[in-house]
Image (cartoon, helix red, strand yellow):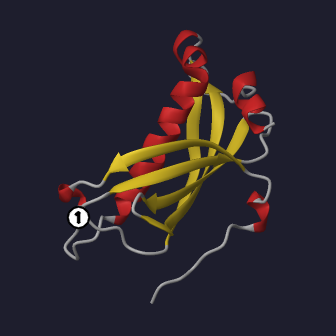
Amino acid sequence: MRFEATPAATDANRRLVYRSEMPLRWGDQDAMNHINNTLYFRYMEQARVEWLDAMCAEERKESNQGAVLVTASCAFLRPLTYPGNIICDVFIGQPGRSSLPTFYEVRRTDDERLFAMGEAKLVWIDKTSGRSIPLPESLRQAFF
């Protein structure tokens, strides 16, 4: 049975900020010849890290600050299978003082259907103190 999910009402104001294309690897398959569920989180992570590097690499490197993941979820809508490539779209929601909701959509490059949807909440921190600090302006501006 396949389930079609629709974006939650809370992410109605989300904005597409990044697209990452990645290969599906043969070794990522499970015993059912599907890409293992844990890999979907890795795809979202990879897209998120690429986007953060593009947006605020200097803030993360020079000032000892960065994002930590405080929640993550994934709705597995249909199985991915090898071989092929995927696209992972990164969306952001309304930023808070130090937090940023992110949303993800995973599709195959040869199939427009949605294979998975994810969400993650990021909190910007000072790595020395471990405490939250205001988001960099570059991230805040990405929403507007």
Q: From this viewpoint, is residue 74 visible?
A: no
Q: Tell me if 109 is positioned left or right of 99 in this view.
A: left
Q: Quadrant of the C terminus?
A: top right
Q: Report the side of 57 relative to 97 (left or right).
A: left
- Find residue 134 and report its image quarter: top right
Looking at the image, residue 68 lies above or below residue 72: above
Residue 103 % position (x, y) = 62, 53
Name the residue furthest bottom: 1
Please rate how many residues cluster around mark 1, counting C-alpha atoms within 10 Å: few if below 14, some from 14 to 19, many from 20: some
Q: Residue at x 29, y 58 (%)?
A: 84
In the figure, is residue 101 to the left or right of 119?
A: right
The kind of residue on which mark 1 rests is Gln
- Mark 1 residue element: loop
Q: Nearer the viewer, residue 66 or 129?
A: 66
Number of numbered labels in the structure image: 1
Give the residue at x 78% y 67%: 9
Q: Is residue 50 above or below residue 115?
A: above
Rendering coords of residue 24 (x, y %): 29, 55
2 relative position to 69: left or right: left
Which residue is pictured at 74% across the width and 51% down the height?
A: 14
Q: Is residue 20 visible?
A: yes
- In the rendered image, residue 130, in percent from the top left (x then y), is placed at 60, 27
Q: Which residue is situated farthest in the front direction here?
A: 110
Relative vertical location of residue 112 with respect to residue 14 in this rendering, above or below: below
Q: Nearer the viewer, residue 124 or 53?
A: 53
The residue under label 1 is 29
Q: Quadrant of residue 135?
A: top right
Residue 16 is situated, as x and y percent measured from the top left of the image, at 66, 46
Classify the position of the N terminus by image quarter: bottom left
Quadrant in which residue 29 is drawn: bottom left
